Image: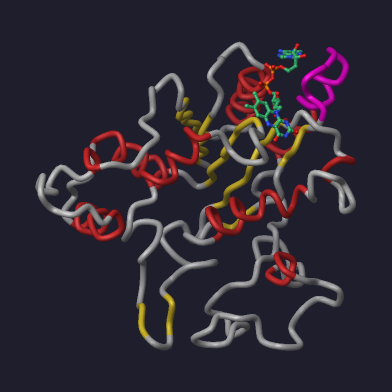
Amino acid sequence: MNVLIVFTHPERHSLNGALLDVMVAELKAQGHEVQVSDLYAMHWKAAVDRADFPDIGPDERLKVASASSREFAADGLTGDVKAEQDKLRWADTVILQFPLWWFAMPAILKGWIDRVYACGFAYGVGEHSDRRWGDRYGEGMMAGKRAMLVVTVGGWSEHYSERGINGQIDDLLFPINHGILFYPGFTVLPPYVAYRVDRLDEARFRTVADELRERMRTLEATSPIPYRKQNDGEYQIPTMELKPGLETPGAVRFALHVGESKSQGE
Ligand code: FAD
């Protein structure tokens, strides 16, 4: 299996850096091919701007989605973006690894998504008509690939529990898992989240490293989050609201879009 890890930390000698080493070593021991995109080491340009679309004239109004669509179709996107898109094509599994910063991913990783996820590549794929909203949420270019988040968090797990003051971790990660990974077609595995990491002693580090090794060993066997697919008939057209009566009892808001667990691999 080909695994791409998008590593997001400004310091290679960090906890995240040590956990990256743990993951890479375990994946290679399992016989997998691994590529790492180390965004800070690559000096990844995070902001989308005119420089991303070389064919846009100086007086032309920049409309990001249409410029992105045009350059993608013409193979005219910048070399750094095309290289990351090639890594995504190559990968069977993609891991986004980052410390939780302000309840979200660090800006440089968001900027990787903003630029690499071109129109025609990660969105704007498939038929868009009055009866179909394209190939997304379970379909799209990343269909057949798996993805998961590896996240380190300063707060306690209780702070991120159902009644925790920070909000539930599944809710905080929903825009990434559902909006960024499931949308272009990835099968999304449950995230690995390490809590209370700022004062980690050696014993806790060993526990976290062991848990992460186990997640790397079971990438292909882990049951995904059973998000509902857009084009499986569960949503009303064209409003894309979940049809009445399909919800899991008690489920509201984000949880509405998680269906029954199916057998492995969907
Ligand atoms: P490091 O600082 O590198 O290390 C953390 C601990 O692990 C240290 O005690 C270190 O000694 C130990 N360690 C490192 N490497 C090893 C090793 N090889 N072996 C054994 N021990 C090791 N937290 C929240 O909960 N919610 C937030 O919204 C949030 N926002 C933040 C915003 C910013 C801008 C910042 C800077 C932090 C924020 N945090 C937040 C905390 C953040 O999530 C954690 O600081 C981060 O996840 C820790 O990961 P790290 O790789 O930076 O750890």
Nearer to us in this view, 34 or 237: 237
Nearer to us in this view, 107 or 188: 107
Q: Position of residue 30 (x, y in %)?
A: 63, 32
Q: Position of residue 20 (x, y in %)?
A: 61, 24
Q: Is residue 213 magenta?
A: no
Magenta range is 196-209
Q: Is residue 165 above or below residue 202?
A: below
- The quarter of the picture where the C terminus appears is bottom right
Nearer to us in this view, 212 or 52: 52
Q: How is the image coloured?
A: secondary structure
Q: Quadrant of residue 23?
A: top right
Number of numbered labels in the structure image: 0
The residue located at (63%, 42%) in the rendering is: 149
Is 60 situated left or right of 138 in this image? left
Quadrant for ligand 1 reads top right
Is 138 situated left or right of 242 in this image? left
The residue located at (34%, 52%) in the rendering is: 118
Q: Is residue 80 above or below residue 22?
A: below
Q: Position of residue 63 (x, y in %)?
A: 26, 57
The residue located at (17%, 47%) in the rendering is: 76
Is 132 situated left or right of 57 in this image? right
Q: Quadrant of residue 47?
A: top left
Is 77 situated left or right of 31 in this image? left
Q: Is residue 199 magenta?
A: yes
Q: Position of residue 171 (x, y in %)?
A: 72, 54
The residue located at (36%, 44%) in the rendering is: 115
